[in-house]
Image: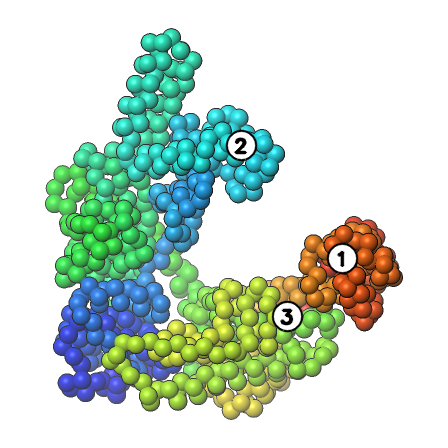
Amino acid sequence: MADPSSYRPKPGEIPDSPGVYRFRDEHRRVIYVGKAKSLRQRLANYFQDLAGLHPRTRSMVTTAASVEWTVVSTEVEALQLEYSWIKEYDPRFNVKYRDDKSYPYLAVTMNEEFPRVQVMRGHKKKGVRYFGPYAHAWAIRDTVDLLLRVFPVRTCSAGVFKNAARTGRPCLLGYIDKCSAPCVDRVSAQEHRELADEFCDFMTGRTSTYIRRLEKQMGEAAEEMEYERAARLRDDIGALKKAMEKNAVVLADATDADLIAVAEDELEAAVQIFHVRGGRVRGQRGWVTDKVEEITTGALVEHALQQLYGEETGDAVPKEVLVPALPDPVEPVQEWLTGRRGSGVSLRIPQRGDKKALMETVQRNAQQALVLHKTKRASDLTTRSRALEEIADALDLDSAPLRIECYDISHLQGDDVVASMVVFEDGLARKSEYRRFQIKGFAGQDDVRSMHEVITRRFRRYLAEKERTGEWADGETTVTGETTVETTVTGETTENGETTENGETTETGEIIGTSLTEDDGRPKKFAYPPQLVVVDGGAPQVAAARRALDDLGIDDIAVCGLAKRLEEVWLPGDDDPVVLPRTSEGLYLLQRVRDEAHRFAITYQRTKRSKRFRSSPLDDVPGLGDARKQALLKHFGSLKKLRSATIDQICEVPGIGRKTAETIAAALAQAAPAAPAVNTATGEIMEEEPGTMGTGGEPVRTGAPDERRGQET
């Protein structure tokens, strides 16, 4: 625990101007980002007597080890920079709203030649118009099904669209008049886009125009005695009205507004948002956050506005935003919203009438969401805390292990030896921190030696990052606000299978081969040490892990192993294991960590094995793509027959010239024939048969997958 006076800036160093400040911990992680109209006055509040601080603020300043700031010109710039840094650094002490679900949107892909109506989740894409969010995807599909009678916009995927265009036959929706079938040129691209524009207009609340137009057309059809067309128009009007009835009118003046309500207690806060367009509720969403700092309702509203509109522009920001309390000061926030929309935005508290009544409804939803969240989370928090305490007591640790790393070795009879590292923080999996390793220090099967290599590589990187951080800390500049990023080639890879130097990977697929300076503040590779290292195995694996840490001079990280046979916990140097009760929450947590490491390692090992089985000597022939490989294999039937073919016979394959044939023949001559596949259940040698080759041309191992899987470790 740090003493705030040890890093308090000297008097006069802090400017009396608007700006954004960052607190960092001893590992140079950004743990809190804030903004201020006057940096001097705001930061002075953090360095008063600890007894006078709010408990959460006290925890933040004692966790921090330094503070820095960036001066800006206006409060609006401070608001924008604060939002950017919170999104980038994800500070642990800032208010972070968590979506209670991934909300579906009704999306119209106006960025395509033939716009498509579909359900979308996740990040918004440029050029796509979104409506919602909705509570359920089926609600979107019901609405779309009704509207397609009047606005027959394409809803099919790209593959279905291309296939219909190729065959000249539309899909079923085209035959039942719920799609205008642009795939077969029933309408032009311009006509189809106009239909999509009308669909979007209707969804934005401009409904009366289309209702009146259809009623007029129905009357004209009836006068001309075209009763079938009139009946169809009548049904279209009914479909539109039914779609409108799904969202009752809540504001009679057809207002476009977002209503935000907050329900809070001392520890947590829940936010509910109703999106009203054209006077009707078009979407709803909710967030929950831990109050890790002393914060007012107005500040909670400000953070909600940042998250809600931080990446929105234009009509996505409504003309009115109704809130339960105004941020202090309100002017910068209102100016920021106006800039996002491009025109005036009214940010206010509703005082009377329909808007106040609707705000009360939103408030009740927020209160119910908070109660439901606390009901779901109470037992979970209690259980995880008890599990960490039981582990600390059983292993005689000084404190609960808030970060646990677990390692497992996986191979198949000594081939494709890999290792996994999984991370649990506060008892929950932190998948962005997972890593994979290829064992390359030796060949063959030796779990103990493999464990020593993996632990050594992981913590050697930790020491390197720690040393680098110590060297850079002296020359740090805190006032300029400039951020520098230094990129170095480290050999890490992503899960997409790229070949690398040392083989570490991330499960999430993010590239981790960039070394970021501490001015960046984001988590570095292997930068944070765990309080506990768990290995999958018994005394030999534990001894290897402890020896690797001792060789590196690391003596402040605890090590234990969890053996599968009796689920017993082994400690370094102990002749007897620690046996936790079967009902122990601590044992259950260790089992979850071990099983996750095993799953992660097995998945990687199977991926590598399947790639090896699909490999072929043809892969090494320069300029030979997949199409010509398939043509060769189709022509000869198997790689074995291709290997015995003459150059003239290879030249008979369409697209293969003599020079390429000579290269293929040379590559096949140099490559040793693949070993025959063996059924591990019966010992039978599997012959090559047409139709059993993998994508690379080698025979697929087809024997007893369950029994093969049983030999994986």
- Tag 3 or tag 1, which sits nearer the N-term? 3
Residue shown at the point (31%, 65%) measured from the top left: 84
The amino acid type of the residue labelled 2 equals Val
Q: Position of residue 692 (x, y in %)?
A: 78, 53
Residue occupied by mark 3 = 564
User: Disc 3 on helix, strand or loop?
Assistant: loop
Observer-nearest of 83 and 153: 153
- Tag 1 or tag 2, which sits nearer the N-term? 2
Residue occupied by mark 2 = 184
User: Disc 2 on helix, strand or loop?
Assistant: helix
Query: Which one is in front in this view, the residue at disc 3 or the one at disc 2?
Result: 2
For the N terminus, the image quarter is bottom left
Q: Residues within 10 Å of mark 2 (few under 14, many from 20)?
A: some
Question: What is the CA distance from the residue labelled 3 to the residue labelled 2?
Answer: 61 Å
The amino acid type of the residue labelled 1 equals Ile
Question: What is the CA distance from the residue labelled 2 to the residue labelled 1?
Answer: 37 Å
Q: Position of residue 553 (x, y in %)?
A: 51, 91
The amino acid type of the residue labelled 3 equals Lys
Query: Which one is in front in this view, the residue at disc 1 or the one at disc 3?
Result: 1
- Residue 656: numbered disc: 1
